[in-house]
Image (cartoon, rainbow, N blue to C red):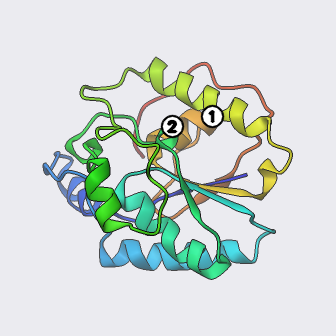
Amino acid sequence: MILLRHGQSEFNLHFSATRRDPGIKDPKLTELGHQQAEAAAEALAGVQEIRRIIASPYTRALQTAAPLARRLRLPVLVNPIVRERYAFTCDIGSPATALRGEWPDLTLDHLEEVWWPLEEEPAEQVLARAARFRGEMAALEDWAHTVVVSHWGFILSMTGQSVANGQWLPCDPTEPALQEVVWKHH
């Protein structure tokens, strides 16, 4: 499967300049972020036969998944298990009712109204969540045909690698889950 980090968000733009939390809840993509999402969609559409797109419920991930879904005429399957590690204001999501209003074509009935944690998520919890997702994906025969639109911390927990906005990595969910990672942005 392919793990795609969302495009640049308003949070990423400000945080990379100041290294301070700018206090933006569930940020949207910047213009560069939209360009990164379009570029990823164009590149990934030709990589392999993609049959499934899974995305985190954060707006930045949904906006990144949208161009690929349009291009491939596939639904986006929203799964909160692939969300970001809750550590900053940007990790406060939008309530399920707000997401339903913003994304009427997505199936969101399975989301709790508040689907993100309410306090900082310990590293072990993110690793456990990644291991659980790895197991769920490994059980699927066609896992190789999946793109997962996720976040820096979740992708790090799956692969041990740090990726920039709009970048992607292959990931084999049948490989053993990571036991620890170094939580350090590049």
Report the side of 93 relative to 122 (left or right).
left
Position of residue 2 measured from the top left corner of the image (x, y, whole percent):
68, 55
Report the side of 149 relative to 90 (left or right).
right
Amino acid identity at mark 1? Phe
Position of residue 6 measured from the top left corner of the image (x, y, whole percent):
45, 60
**Numbered badge on residue 91:** none
Tell me: residue 83, above or below residue 78: above
Q: Residue at x 38, y 66 (%)?
A: 103
Which quadrant holds residue 185? top left
Q: Find the residue positioned furthest to the front.
A: 109
Position of residue 70 measured from the top left corner of the image (x, y, whole percent):
57, 79
Which quadrant holds residue 85? top left
Does label 1 or label 2 sit earlier along the sequence?
2
Dot 2: element: helix
Report the side of 156 relative to 71 (left or right).
left
Density class for disc 2 (Cα within 10 Å; few <14, some 14-19, many ≥20) is: some
Q: Are marks 1 and 2 in contact (CB under 8 Å)?
A: yes
Position of residue 22 measured from the top left corner of the image (x, y, whole percent):
14, 51
- Viewer-closest of 127 and 160: 127
Q: Which residue is mark 1?
A: 133
Q: Residue at x 83, y 51 (%)?
A: 142
* Marks 1/2: CA–CA distance: 7 Å
Q: Residue at x 46, y 41 (%)?
A: 80
Q: Residue at x 44, y 52 (%)?
A: 108
Q: Which residue is mark 2?
A: 81
Dot 1: element: helix
Tell me: residue 102, above or below residue 55: below
Density class for disc 1 (Cα within 10 Å; few <14, some 14-19, many ≥20) is: some
For the question of whether residue 181 can be seen, the reply is no
How many marks the image carries: the answer is 2
For the question of whether residue 20 can be seen, the reply is yes
- Viewer-closest of 2 and 180: 2
